Amino acid sequence: MKKLIRPHYIDKFEKISTEIKLNSGESINVYTISQVLTDDDKNEWSKHILHHYITDEEINCGIKTNKVAREDYIENYVLPSIELRNGGEVSGVFGEIVFSDFIEYILHFNVPRYKFYNNFPGNPNQGIDIVAYKIDEKNTNNDMVLFAEIKARLSNKNFHDLQEAINDAEKRTDKDYALILDSARRKLYAMGNSEEAKAISRFSDSETPCVRIKGAGLITSANSCSSDDFVAKGKFIGVNIKNGEKIETHVIYVDDLWELTKDLWRRACL
């Protein structure tokens, strides 16, 4: 599987400039996609989502093998159903893909894209949501690996759902991380991506120094929030990180997120 191309919708991200804090005092980074997305933006984004699951060559082969139309093949054999569990599976997938793009192109980590490749619809992945890493060419002791837990709420505005992602991050142990890294390494090798598999192996060695980071993220639907709105209305009152834990937290909100997601899924099948 080839490395995915940077999608242009990334250029529409805008950081909320006001300093926003959780109830427990930690700073949190809030972003929105504020600019209007064109049809070209949406078409490219939809194909970017699809290519997390399958290549164009494999789609053509699947169409011939199953003797079905392209739209039917992608909808029934490739992408998770937008109808299943009221969109619950699509919600999780979409959130993880958006945050993978955000972590790679905004935070500048390497994010291996292995979780959804060649998965059958209705068979969601288990384990950590996102594994990402940075390599320091001058000092390997500064190499970083990020384990991020992501929650997505596409049809409602509830910033307190960030607490669920924080809770999941707090519960993770070194044993969990070892299993997650090993699973990622094996899947990447099976996909023929030996370069990223070797990079992941570097972080699997418990005796090799590196910086390990816990992350928590939420993508949610919201209308016309502003910097002042976040501060004045206390969006994150009641959202806490346990004393002594260090968790990087990010929130992304988008207007009419559920309608956008359904549109992208429809376009991906075309």
Image (spheres, helix red, strand yellow):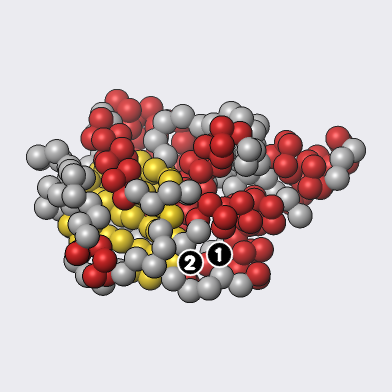
Residue labelled with disc 1: 7
| Nearest to the observer: residue 86 or residue 69 | 86
The residue at 28%/46% (across/down) is 160
Q: Residue at x 35, y 35 (%)?
A: 204
Residue 112 in the figure: left or right of residue 20:
right
Image position, residue 258 (x, y; %): 53, 52
Label 1 crowd bin: few (<14), some (14–19), many (20+), radius 10 Å: some
Question: Is residue 115 shown to the viewer in this render?
Answer: no
Residue 76 in the image: x percent, y percent? 74, 37
Q: Which mark is residue 10?
A: 2
Q: Residue at x 86, y 35 (%)?
A: 66
Report the Cα–Cα distance between label 2 and label 1.
6 Å
Amino acid beneath label 2: Ile
Amino acid on which disc 1 is placed? Pro
Residue 79 has which mark? none
SS state under label 1: loop
Instruction: Give the left or right position of residue 253, taking residue 208 as reference.
Output: right
Q: Does residue 247 lie above or below 33 as drawn?
A: above
